[in-house]
Image: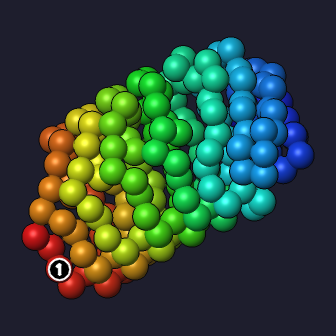
Amino acid sequence: YNDIFLIFCLSCKVLVQNETCLCIKNSLVDYTIKCNSYNIVDLKNNYTLKEINIYLENFNKLNIYLDFSSSNLKFIHQNVFKELYSLKEINLYKNDLIYLPKYLFKDLIYLEYLVLTENRLEIIENQTFIGLKKLIELHLDRNLIRKIESNGFIDLKNLEALFLNNNSLSEMN
């Protein structure tokens, strides 16, 4: 990273390339992060975050990378990625996610890489990945996935690599 600013706001830590952001704590799990323009937003290693309920104001300009890896996340609110149309990559590696809400990724029409490695996901429900028509790589390895429902991977028309190794897969419809 070049010219990176590290912003600390109570337990919310944001690393952004070429930008100063404002981080506002709304409650124990609610944060508002306001930035104007950026390419990389790094929220990894936020161990005090238990769930993503972050309002990403002005993030519709975000066009490269969003990193929530190693942040001890247990839950992602359904609208957290709302209107982040130009986002290309999300890294949710090494968290404690057990569930992905349906339509979570529906607005991410240009997302190409999604990393969900080393979480605790058990079931891939129908329409979990709806909207991800440009997705090239999906990393679901090293989870606890035992079941993939019949339309779990609907819309993944450009998928070139799917990583499912080290799961407990017993049922795939």
Quadrant hosting residue 113: top left
Residue positioned 71% across, 44% down in the render: 30
Callout 1 crowding tier (Cα within 10 Å): few <14, some 14–19, many ≥20: few
Quadrant hosting residue 22: top right
Q: Is residue 91 above or below residue 50?
A: above
Disc 1 is placed on an element classified as: strand
Q: In this view, does 69 lie to the left or right of 33?
A: left
Residue positioned 76% across, 21% down in the render: 19
List x then y, in percent, for residue 89: 46, 39
| Quadrant including the N terminus | top right
The mark tally for this picture is 1
List x then y, in percent, for residue 133: 23, 36
* Most foreground residue, 77 or 135: 77
Q: Mark 1 points at which residue?
A: 171
List x then y, in percent, for residue 163: 31, 64
Q: Is residue 9 left or right of residue 76?
A: right
Q: Is residue 141 above or below residue 57?
A: below
Is residue 70 at all visible to an observer of this figure? no
Residue positioned 46% across, 31% down in the render: 82
List x then y, in percent, for residue 99: 43, 64
Is residue 20 at all visible to an observer of this figure? yes
Q: In this view, does 152 lie above or below 59?
A: below
How are the residues colored? rainbow
Residue farthest to the front, as pictured: 27
Residue positioned 62% across, 45% down in the render: 53
Q: Is residue 83 above or below residue 154?
A: above
| Residue type at numbered disc 1 | Glu
| Quadrant including the C terminus | bottom left
Q: In this view, does 69 lie to the left or right of 46?
A: left
